């Protein structure tokens, strides 16, 4: 992954994220964004590229509640290995 700024928004049942390229200019270029939703019921992850096209999806399965430590670890690990470069 390129040098990036990661923005996280953790709510009670979801975590949303955006990854932005840091290229030294005054603007940030979106690399990808996504979310983990329904963490207490049917948790699932989805990531989309800057163009809105799906990059990856993952389901833990209905009834398999996860906590924010688990969903944040998943997001960070995914970003380190899979986030697109600018």
Image: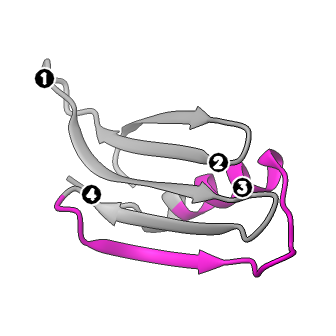
Q: In what element is the residue under mark 2?
A: loop
Query: Dividing the image into 4 quarters, which one contains the N terminus?
Result: bottom left
* Vertical position of residue 35 compared to residue 10: above or below: below
Mark number for residue 36? none
Q: Earlier in the sequence, mark 1 or mark 4?
A: 1
Instruction: Identify the residue shown where x is 20% and y is 33%.
Output: 23
Which badge, 2 or 4, is on the more N-terminal residue?
Answer: 2
What span is in magenta? 51-78
Q: Between tags 1 and 3, which lies in front?
A: 3
Which residue position is annotated with label 2? 14
Q: Which residue is mark 3?
A: 71
Residue 4: where, in percent of width, then height? 37, 39
Q: Percent from the top left, x then y, of residue 74?
A: 67, 61
Give the residue drawn at x 62%, y 58%.
37
Q: Say left or right for 6 vs 74.
A: left
Residue 13 percent across, percent down from the top left: 71, 47
Q: Residues within 10 Å of mark 3 (few under 14, many from 20)?
A: many
Residue identifier under label 1: 25
- Which labelled disc corresponds to residue 85? 4
Q: Residues within 10 Å of mark 1 (few under 14, many from 20)?
A: few
Assess whether residue 77 is covered by the magenta stretch: yes
| Residue plotted at (66% across, 79% down) | 59
Q: Nearer the viewer, residue 78 or 55?
A: 55
Judge by depth and name the residue closer to the eye, 9 or 29: 9
CB atoms at circles 3 and 4 under 8 Å apart? no
The color scheme shown is: one colour
Q: Look at 38% across and 44% down and name the residue there.
A: 19
């Amino acid at each position: 992954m390129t040098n990036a700024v990661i923005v996280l928004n953790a709510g009670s049942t979801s975590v949303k994220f955006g990854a932005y390229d840091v290229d030294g200019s005054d603007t940030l270029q979106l690399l990808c964004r996504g979310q983990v939703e329904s963490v207490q019921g049917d948790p699932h992850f989805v990531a989309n590229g800057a163009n809105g096209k799906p990059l990856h999806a993952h389901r833990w399965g209905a009834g398999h509640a996860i906590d924010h430590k688990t969903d944040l670890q998943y997001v960070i690990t995914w970003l380190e290995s899979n986030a697109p470069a600018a």
